[in-house]
Image (tube, rainbow, N blue to C red):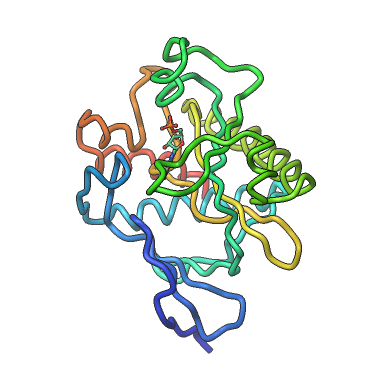
Amino acid sequence: MAIQKGDLLYAGKAKSVFRTDREGIFLVEFRDDITAFDGGKKDVLAKKGSLNARVSAFLFSHLKECGIPTHFIEMIDERSMLVRSLDMIPLEVIVRNVAAGSMVRTYPIAEGTPLNPPVLVMDYKDDSRHDPMLNDDLILALKIVNADELARIKELAHSINRILFQFFESLDITLVDFKIEFGKADGQILLGDEISMDSMRLWDAGTGESLDKDVYRFSKGDVLAVYRRVAERICARE
Ligand code: 5GP
């Protein structure tokens, strides 16, 4: 019997999460909304939701095959995926392979500087506080997670980075940085949320051209055309 979509549980800036008639399973709908600068810039781009859903589903499946626990179950239409319900951890876990974005705005380092080893930072997920950066002591003092969970999150984030970096390298794309979120279910930490062009910074390895939300943030061109191109390049491996 097909799963039934239930009440809206939460509407974020680009995704809505619904209950379903199955215990422990939520439905995530990727909408066509695109926002930047804490919602200061907003638009609706037809088909953007389905492009991000497809890429997220592909990357979750790839990570799962590589042994990473994720919330992803399956796609049920072009913009909706079934996921395991998680208690989300309010951390934005960011891994950087190349200096860009807020890192070059905040610190004395040139855009494009390779970061080896990769730089992992965690921000407190709270738009009203502009997602302030945390450190280990703050994370423990705020009791966001315990020390074992923090170690596991870091280990998973570095493994995810290694897997995704290699995957994108094989497509001649540099995975500059990305943001992921984790949640808990049955005492286990799983990758949740999404991994899409909205949450990664991708540069064409040959030309250095942006293939991600920076095209929208900084009005660098037709963001939908770029998302479509990169989705086709990623999902050609399906
Ligand atoms: P930065 O700190 O340079 O702005 O962002 C680093 C990376 O994390 C970029 O790939 C960016 O897209 C992603 N990122 C940071 N904050 C957010 C956020 O609130 N939402 C999403 N979707 N991605 C984010």
Residue positioned 57% across, 75% down in the render: 25
Residue positioned 41% across, 26% down in the render: 102
* Quadrant of the rendered image containing residue 227: top left
Residue 148 placement, left or right of 69: right
* Vertical arrangement, residue 120 with respect to residue 195, above or below: above
Viewer-side residue, 136 vs 236: 136
Q: Is residue 78 visible?
A: no
- The total number of labels drawn is 0
Residue, far front = 141
Ligand 1 found in image quarter: top left
Q: Position of residue 234 (x, y in %)?
A: 46, 42
Viewer-side residue, 124 vs 42: 124
Q: Position of residue 99 (x, y in %)?
A: 48, 19
Q: Position of residue 59 (x, y in %)?
A: 54, 48
* Vertical arrangement, residue 116 with respect to residue 56, above or below: above
Viewer-side residue, 90 vs 55: 90
Residue 89 placement, left or right of 198: right
Q: Is residue 119 visible?
A: yes
Residue positioned 51% across, 20% down in the render: 98
* Vertical arrangement, residue 175 with respect to residue 92, above or below: above
Residue, far bottom = 1
Residue 66 placement, left or right of 234: right
* Vertical arrangement, residue 134 with respect to residue 210, above or below: below
Q: Position of residue 209 (x, y in %)?
A: 33, 23
Residue positioned 57% across, 37% down in the render: 122
